[in-house]
Image (tube, grey):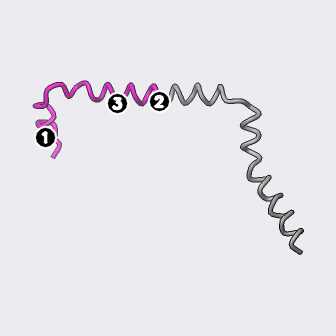
């Protein structure tokens, strides 16, 4: 099966550039993601990490008010 695919791929002109392009896109995406994560503000991360806890407190307050 691989012989058929390999033969078809070898006959396409210029196909050898596609794996290189894919690798570069993959690499630059994760480098950009890495830079974005380390440049993100710590205050924003703390605020976002407390959202689930804030929602529970909010639900508890709403339940106490309805009783």
Disc 1 or disc 2, which is closer to the eye?
Answer: 2
Residue drawn at x 74%, y 31% as measured from the top left:
42
- In the displayed structure, 66 sits above or below 45; it is below
Magenta segment includes 4: yes
x, y (%) of residue 4?
Answer: 12, 42
Disc 1 or disc 3, which is closer to the eye?
Answer: 3
Secondary structure found at label 2:
helix
x, y (%) of residue 38?
Answer: 64, 27
Earlier residue among tags 1 and 2? 1
Secondary structure found at label 3:
helix
Numbered mark located on residue 3 in the image: 1
Secondary structure found at label 1:
helix
Q: In front: 60, or 8?
A: 60
Magenta segment includes 50: no
Span colored in magenta: 1-28
Q: Dot 3 corresponds to which residue?
A: 22
Locate the C terminus and report the quarter of the image it occupies: bottom right
Residue drawn at x 62%, y 30% as measured from the top left:
37
**Which secondary structure is most common in the magenta stretch?**
helix
Earlier residue among tags 1 and 3? 1
Residue drawn at x 79%, y 59% as measured from the top left:
56
Q: In front: 23, or 46?
A: 46
Q: In front: 38, or 1?
A: 38
Numbered mark located on residue 27 in the image: none
Dot 2, crowdedness within 10 Å: few (<14), some or many (≥20)?
few
Q: Dot 2 corresponds to which residue?
A: 29
Asked if the residue under mark 2 is in contact with the one under mark 1, i.e. CB atoms within 8 Å, the reply is no
x, y (%) of residue 57?
Answer: 83, 58
Asked if the residue under mark 3 is in contact with the one under mark 2, i.e. CB atoms within 8 Å, the reply is no
């Amino acid at each position: 099966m691989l012989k058929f695919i390999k033969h078809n791929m070898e006959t396409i002109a210029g196909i050898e550039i596609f794996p290189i392009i894919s690798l570069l896109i993959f690499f630059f995406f994760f480098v950009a993601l890495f830079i974005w994560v380390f440049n993100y503000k710590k205050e924003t991360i703390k605020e976002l990490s407390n959202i689930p806890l804030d929602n529970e407190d909010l639900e508890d307050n709403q339940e106490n008010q309805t009783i």
